[in-house]
Image (spheres, grey):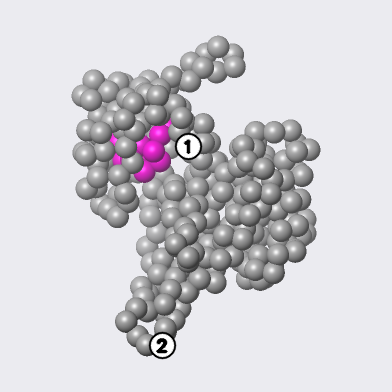
Amino acid sequence: MARFSSDEPAAEPAPSPAEPLRLQVLTALALHRMATTGQLRQMLRPDSPRQLISRVLNKLRSAGFVDLTVLQEPDRSRTHAWYLTPDGVRLTRDLPLLRGRPPYRITSATAASLKTPHTLCVVRAHLPFAADARRLGHEHGPWDWTPEVAHSIGEGERLVADAVLHYTHIDSEHRRKLRGFVEVDRTTMSSERLAVKLIEYARLFQYEAQSVGRRRPVSTGPTWLRWYPVFPRVLFVLTGASRARLEDRISDLQAMAAQHPLVAALAREVPLGAAVLEDIEKHGPTAPVWVPLPGGEPRPWTEL
């Protein structure tokens, strides 16, 4: 089992300016799957003009490493969503940051368009955490948000989190390392199916793999300890519907936390919360916009 130290060095809050921007762009697209020009700017160079990122992207496109799909906005403007080509995937697959991550290939603009809405929404959920970290002097950058992280929950099934968040909260000399499973809900599934995700996290919390080759199965402990020193908090980020409908969905998540025995057990040990994406973007994730699923007043995600 891996050993973890509470004073291990944290990842840099932002990419080093010494790294070539083209490499940072390729790495960001390899990790986050897809992003718009504006999202890449917010991730990598928030204080630089938009044209800087655009020039790099256009050069990478001319070289055949990235491509784009065009999004038609409600105001008839157009937004470019960028992704790696197969050549771009081959170029980045051996980067240290991406070792152990399965390749993510998008073979055409049509395929990209099918993945765009949810993928870009997950990136959108990441950006307020990064902006908050910069403002508050905490540590959380583009490489501290890993999309589509899968874990076995037994019986041949897997839980796939939309993202795993790593965040270092710094208060004077105290460094507090926080982790979170992030589920981004665009109101495209039923409220019941959304709430069932809590059961999957409860199963992961309890799942223990059995050693092979013994007459009597021997537990090796909870499998999540292979990757996390403590079980990450579970954060639901909701958008895509009226305020009343989103509040109803949060109420359904709270009901699942109260009524399902496995989820109730999880809620006693692990912070669980839900917030509206627009509130996170307007006020920041460390504002009191998170509803604790076990009950209570809204609070910052760091205090769930």
Is residue 36 positioned above or below 125 on the image?
A: above
Between 237 and 24, the residue placed more toward the observer is: 237
Q: Residue furthest top?
A: 76
Crowding around mark 1 (Cα neighbors within 10 Å: few <14, some 14 to 19, many 20+) is some
Mark 2 to mark 1 CA distance (whole Å): 44 Å
Secondary structure of the residue carrying tag 1 is helix
Is residue 178 positioned above or below 86 on the image?
A: below
Between 233 and 39, the residue placed more toward the observer is: 233
Q: Where does residue 18 sit, x and y in percent of width and height?
A: 26, 41
* Magenta highlight: main SS: helix
Residue at position x 48%, y 53% in the image: 160
Is residue 7 positioned above or below 256 on the image?
A: below
The residue mark sitting in front, 2 or 1, is: 2
The tag earlier along the polypeptide, 2 or 1, is 1
Tell me which corner region of the image, top left, top right, bottom left or bottom right, holds residue 228.
Answer: bottom left
Residue at position x 39%, y 29% in the image: 111
267 relative to 97 in the view: left or right: right
Residue range of the region highlighted in magenta in the rendering:
26-36
Q: Where does residue 31 sit, x and y in percent of width and height?
A: 36, 43
Tell me which corner region of the image, top left, top right, bottom left or bottom right, holds residue 219.
Answer: bottom left
Query: Looking at the picture, which amino acid does disc 1 mark?
Result: Thr
Between 56 and 1, the residue placed more toward the observer is: 1
Residue 29 magenta-highlighted: yes
The residue indicated by pointer 1 is 119
Q: Where does residue 78 sit, x and y in percent of width and height?
A: 48, 16
Q: Which mark is residue 304?
A: none
Residue 24 magenta-highlighted: no
Q: Quadrant of the C terminus?
A: bottom right
The residue indicated by pointer 2 is 216
Crowding around mark 2 (Cα neighbors within 10 Å: few <14, some 14 to 19, many 20+) is few
